[in-house]
Amino acid sequence: MATSDECCSVQLIDGDGSFNDTGIESFIKEVKLHECGLSYAVVSIMGPQSSGKSTLLNNLFYTNFREMDAFKGRSQTTKGIWMAKCAGIEPCTIVMDLEGTDGRERGEDDTAFEKQSALFALAVSDIVLINMWCHDIGREQAANKPLLKTVFQVMMRLFSPRKTTLMFVIRDKTRTPLENLEPVLREDIQKIWDSVPKPQAHKETPLSEFFNVEVVALSSYEEKEEQFKEQVANLRQRFNHSIAPGGLAGDRRGVVPASGFSFSAQQIWKVIKENKDLDLPAHKVMVATVRCEEIANEKFTGFTANENWCLLEEAVQSGPVAGFGKKLNSILCTSLSEYDAEATYFDEGVRSAKRKQLEEKLLQLVQPAYLSMLGHLRSGTLEKFKEAFEEALNGGEGFSLAARNCTQSYMALFDERCTDANVELANWDCSKVRDKLCRDIDTHVASVRAAKLLELTSSYEAKLNEALAGPVEAFLDGANNETWPSIKKLLQRETVSAVSGLSSALSGFEMDAKDKEKMLTSLQDYARGVVEAKAREEAGRVLIRMKDRFSTLFSHDSDSMPRVWTGKEDIRAITKTARSASLKLLSVMAAIRLDDDVDNIENTLTSALVDTKSNAAVADKSITTFDPLASSSWEQVPPAKTLITPVQCKSLWRQFRAETEYSVTQAISAQEASRRNNNWMPPPWAIVALVVLGFNEFMTLLRNPLYLGVLFVGYLTVKALWVQLNISGEFQHGVLPGLLSISTKFLPTVMNLLTKLAEQGQSPATNNPQTNSGATAFKSFQNGSSSSNTSSSASSGVTASGNDIDYSSPPKED
């Protein structure tokens, strides 16, 4: 590629017809043709070989095409097609210098390249200069005739020829005025046009439909060089703004944008070389398609590498970005605007289609970022909704009202943020994300609602449990005729209170009447269940309760003081009373009586377990009658309300009697021991015998008072030994153990008494020593008696066997 200060030229097609695609790309970059859009013009020149075409172009456009050296002879100088940029002409004008026609180098029959180059020039040029000699005008076989025929013939191969300006440059003008030469030339041109075969569609088409014919004349360059240059300078002025309205090519059509010129020229030459008809409209579309696609790919690649887009994409991955939609829309519009600017001159249909494809690709590229943005907005809005909803509930606002207000508020906030994130070019629908947010909010509200309802229910259930469990246990512990009515009243009172409280609490939930009634009924059932569960729990401990009640009533009097079995108590009556009370507890615990149903459990148990006469009568019969407790259910009592079955009651009563027999036996033993300790008087007959038989001895004592003193001292001594040795207590465990124990304690006891008497003798004498001795002895006697009574009341080692023993106190002795 040849260059000068203002001119740049390149061989576009060599003499063998090879297209220089690399050279033209470099040429276009050098002259910045791609920046021109449609504001450029292409001028080409054709004519006979060695007719001064290159010389004319160099003088007219200040190019640097190679010129023929006349001193070396006339020969072919330009081979193929050369291209150069005109210097100093606006708009940008590209000139092509075609290889001359009728050259001896190619021979007479080799006219293929002439036709190919002529067709190429017509296809890409806005202005075609036809260089011809002045002396050939008017001749039938002049050199310009074959050239014109070639031009018109190849023009017919264009399906839709572009409007081209044909400027006939008459060289070496003679003295014949141009006004006389021009009509002759135009007449010859018309004849040639009429003689050229045309397609059926253009049979009657005038020449002016395809060509603007201009005629100029120039003086001889060799003979009148100054005049030639002056005329060329004037002609140069006509090429300034040649594409403007009224210019040389002001009415041109089918122009290829400058950025697609290289590809268009290459494809045109390819079609021409393949000897195919050149469909310029289709070619225009093809060029626009390829070029617009290239531009679209460039803009797509540029968008992916765009720093603003990369930063935005990175930012949206970690969280929501304020103004996302505007920022992204701005970047997209910039890329599309750049595409529009570069593709604006190409075919509108192709340009629009490729723009749409580019837009779709760009939107497809950015859509994941948009979806990420919506995801952040959805999750962020959901979290804020949860916080606001919790605060509203903690602030005492009704559940349904809080849910409704928070949902409306945050859905509106989400819509606002979606609008901010919306990309105008895409017009994407965010309804699916919005619907998912609605579902998430509804799910959260439902879960919180369920949790709150469960919390409310659990709270009131806990209150009911606390209010019922303890009192029910106390009522059942003191079982009597009023136990179940009292429990029933307690249950009704606490249930009404809890149901009322729960109903008020549920008013803020705006529940369906059926659901609300179901919850209240469930709470009522729970309260009843608490009572029934507590009753069943206490029924499992009924035996312990019965024994505790028996022990309390049997071992304590009416003042709740421990009983001391002195022998005056009626153990039979006390035992019967205690067992009746225990049986009463068993009958109360046998079934749940929260309804108004009537049963005969107590009568059945009394008749079967306590009525001894009835039991004895049954035992005397030879034929066994029906046992009311030989059943697994009570009459008039459903199984669900049964706590202790009749069979279990019978078994429990048998176990109860067996475990309380010991206490009764101990009481009887203690009573008998107390009577023995307190009854030392001999029988009346013994007293009478002593009086009758001992009368003489009694009189002897009266006559001799010394005997009486000796007997009194002996009595005191024996009594002291009796008390000290606790003889009555020792013999309670048997004769042999008593004798052994007394024998071991006798001597120490006697020594103890003598020591005490010695100590009394050494003490200072008083006015009444006998009284002191008597007081001391009496005191010792009292201590011994007290110890003997205590030991007697605590002793009991008798056990009884059998469940039908009749316990009664021994008859009192007067």
Image (cartoon, helix red, strand yellow):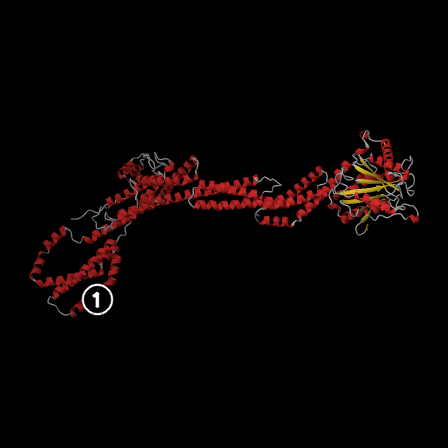
Q: Is residue 34 left or right of residue 360?
A: right
Q: Residue at x 58, y 49 (%)?
A: 318
Q: Is residue 590 left or right of residue 416?
A: left
Of 209 and 754, nearer the camera is 209
- Amino acid found under the numbered disc labelled 1: Met
Q: Residue furthest left?
A: 703
- The percent position of residue 65, horizontal first and vertical second, equals 84, 48
Q: x, y (%) of residue 761? A: 16, 69
The reply, left or right, for residue 482 in relation to residue 509 is left
At horizontal 54% and vertical 41% (from top left) the residue drawn is 415
Q: Position of residue 601 (x, y in %)?
A: 32, 37
Residue 804 image offset from top left, x and y in percent:
29, 43
Rendering quarter of residue 651: top left
Q: Viewer-proximal residue, 567 or 276?
A: 276
Foreground pick, 524 / 302: 302
Secondary structure under the numbered disc 1 in the rendered image: helix
Task: Report the residue marked by disc 1.
Answer: 751
**Height in image: 766 above or below 676?**
below
Q: Nearer the viewer, residue 687 or 331?
A: 331
- The image shows a total of numbered marks equal to 1
Q: Residue at x 67, y 43 (%)?
A: 337
Q: Is residue 644 visible?
A: no
Q: Residues within 10 Å of mark 1 (few under 14, many from 20)?
A: few
Can residue 217 be seen here? Answer: yes
Residue drawn at x 69%, y 38% is: 352
Corner quadrant of residue 16: top right
